[in-house]
Amino acid sequence: MATAVEFRLEKADSVSQPYMWAVYKTSDSTQLAYSETYTQRQGAINAVYAVKSGQCTYETFQGSDGYWYFHIKGLNHQILARSSYKYTYESGAAAAAKLIKDNAGEAGFYDHAKAA
């Protein structure tokens, strides 16, 4: 049975930090959130599993541009991922964050990055 979201480990554009991960909506492959880049592959994988296991918090906020966004933060308060879109209404950002939160534990994890 497919879940509503999936995690993908991906190759980043940076040579010095070649790994990143993102969360996609499975129904249409829309990217919901993306991570910072990582120097080590295992660091990116660890961050995904922190989100999948619920070891994170979700924060919705209004940016200086007036749009709404969300962050996924680790228990150490560091940002693990940022919303991929700017939302006109807080409810849109909150709904995307909730979709990830409610489905992360059962979500698939796909490795699209080769060891750099």
Image (cartoon, rainbow, N blue to C red):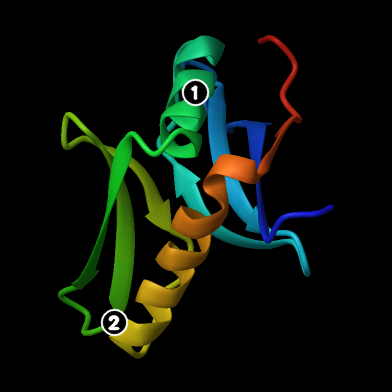
Closer to us: 98 or 69: 98
Q: Estimate how packed mark 2 is, as few (under 14), some (14 to 19) or many (20 or more) residues with alpha carbons within 10 Å.
A: some
Find residue 26 and name its label. Answer: none
- What residue is rendered at 64% in x and 43% in y? 106
Mark 2 vs mark 1: which is more N-terminal? 1
Residue 50 vs 83, above or below: the answer is above
Which residue sits furthest bottom? 89
Which quadrant, please, contains the C terminus? top right
Which residue is the site of mark 1? 44
Verify CB contact (< 8 Å) between mark 2 and mark 1.
no
Q: Nearer the viewer, mark 2 or mark 1?
A: 1
Residue 58 vs 42, above or below: the answer is below
Closer to us: 89 or 103: 103
Amino acid type shown at disc 1: Ala
Residue 115 vs 21, above or below: the answer is above
Closer to us: 7 or 10: 7
- What residue is rendered at 53% in x and 32% in y? 20
Which residue sits furthest right? 1
Could you say where residue 50 lies in the image, as x and y percent from the top left? 41, 29
Per the image, label 1 sits on a secondary structure element best described as: helix
Q: CA distance from mark 2 to mark 1?
A: 28 Å
Find residue 67 and name its label. Answer: 2
Amino acid type shown at disc 2: Tyr
- The number of discs equals 2
Per the image, label 2 sits on a secondary structure element best described as: loop
- What residue is rendered at 78% in x and 69% in y? 28
Left of 116 or right of it: where is 82? left
Could you say where residue 110 lies in the image, as x and y percent from the top left? 74, 33
Tell me where residue 69 sits by quadrant. bottom left
Could you say where residue 51 lies in the image, as x and y percent from the top left? 43, 38
Tell me where residue 70 sits by quadrant. bottom left
